Image (spheres, helix red, strand yellow):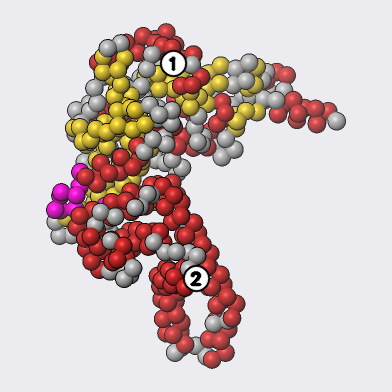
Amino acid sequence: MAGVIAKNSLQYYVVDSNEALEFKLVRRPEDLEDDETTFKPDMSHQVYGDSEQIFGYSGLRIKLYYTAGRLATYLAHTYSDKIHPDKYDGVKPDEVIKPIAERIPPGYLTNLEDFTAALQKEATFRPFGELERRFTARSEEGKERTFEVYRCCVSTPGFLDYHEHFQTFILWYIDAASYIDVDDDKWRFFVTYEKYEFEGRQQYAFTGYTTIYEYYAYPANVRPRISQMLVLPPFQRMGLGAEMLNTIYSNYQSDARVLDITVEDPSDDFARLRDFVDAKNCLSLDSFSKSKLNEGFSQAMVEEAQKKLKLNKRQVRKVYEIIRLHFTNRADKEAYLQYRLEVKNRLNVQYKKEDRDMEKLKKVLKPEEYAATMSITSREKRLESLERQYSELEEHYLRVLERLVIS
């Protein structure tokens, strides 16, 4: 019984690190007390461990605040109660500040008055690099807001120090994230800001960024690969991701050296974003007209999309299937069947390779050994796998089409 009581009392000192953390991009002193300016992490296991729990505190609040433009950083924590080792056989509370402090640039502030004073420098902050795009977007409340995207490289004056600050956000929003090697001059950065007015002066607030690595492609070409893209929570659901991606495309489309633009290990969310943007852009191409879509996938689609939009063949095929699904009447059994068969035939290519490999085995195995290898169970599993792949793909396509308006 005593053991149960001790366990329950210790549970009182366990907090969810995702709930304990609170972020702010502070524009004015009033934001510090405004709960509307607070946002939370998507994850914290990359800092606080797989359990995403912190032991030793009750009512824990971890405050990681940034000035909106310069990203001057404030880090502190408060709590209502803390475990006392002398009452619990020497059990000590977990480190709270150290795991974060080890991952952010040195020089962060721990005094709120110093942080408030740092806000005065926001009026003179200007983005690094070259302005690539300016656009407006509407917030969920319907307010029109202005944004700008700037392109930087590792040699952009002052940029690397700034990059050290904003790259820390990936710890909380991109799984399996790692900091990039900024000594490599093949990295390119597209950084997005909201441009707003405060006390009659134009100011900037960091909203997100994308990193690109420009891989060499034989003989004298470039194959840019998108590595990381992040739009911070206060600026999501306004179309900023699509604008950032189109900015990247516009930057490279006029470069004859660029073969195509690829993506490194895209998340499901980014895959949907990319497919939406690519499908929308392909709709303007002659080879993707409705009449030509009905004729099936063609080399003309590949060549036009690669030349004008820098898409690779695999992505072009995916976009074709998305748009073709839109024009397929799923209530028409025959039309819908033909569409499914076309997609499944593409998915089945991997299995056809296995068939060729099995034919080679047939020549060297004994009949009974080959029969055992080609069991009916393996065929059934193949069909089940193919059907599952198709269902997942169609679900993804339909989610993309929900956002894509096609006249």
Can the viewer see residue 264? no
266 shown above or below 168: below
Quarter the N terminus occupies: top right
In screen coordinates, is 347 left or right of 84?
Answer: left
Q: Secondary structure at mark 1?
A: helix
Can the viewer see residue 356? yes
Of residues 187 and 401, the one nearer the viewer is 401
User: Residue beneath label 2, please?
Assistant: 333
Sooner in the amino-acid sequence: mark 1 or mark 2: 1
Q: Secondary structure at mark 2?
A: helix
User: Residue beneath label 1, please?
Assistant: 31
The residue drawn where x is 30% and y is 32% is 136
Of residues 108 and 379, the one nearer the viewer is 379
Magenta span: 251-263
Q: Position of residue 402 (x, y in %)?
A: 44, 49
Q: Residue furthest right?
A: 1
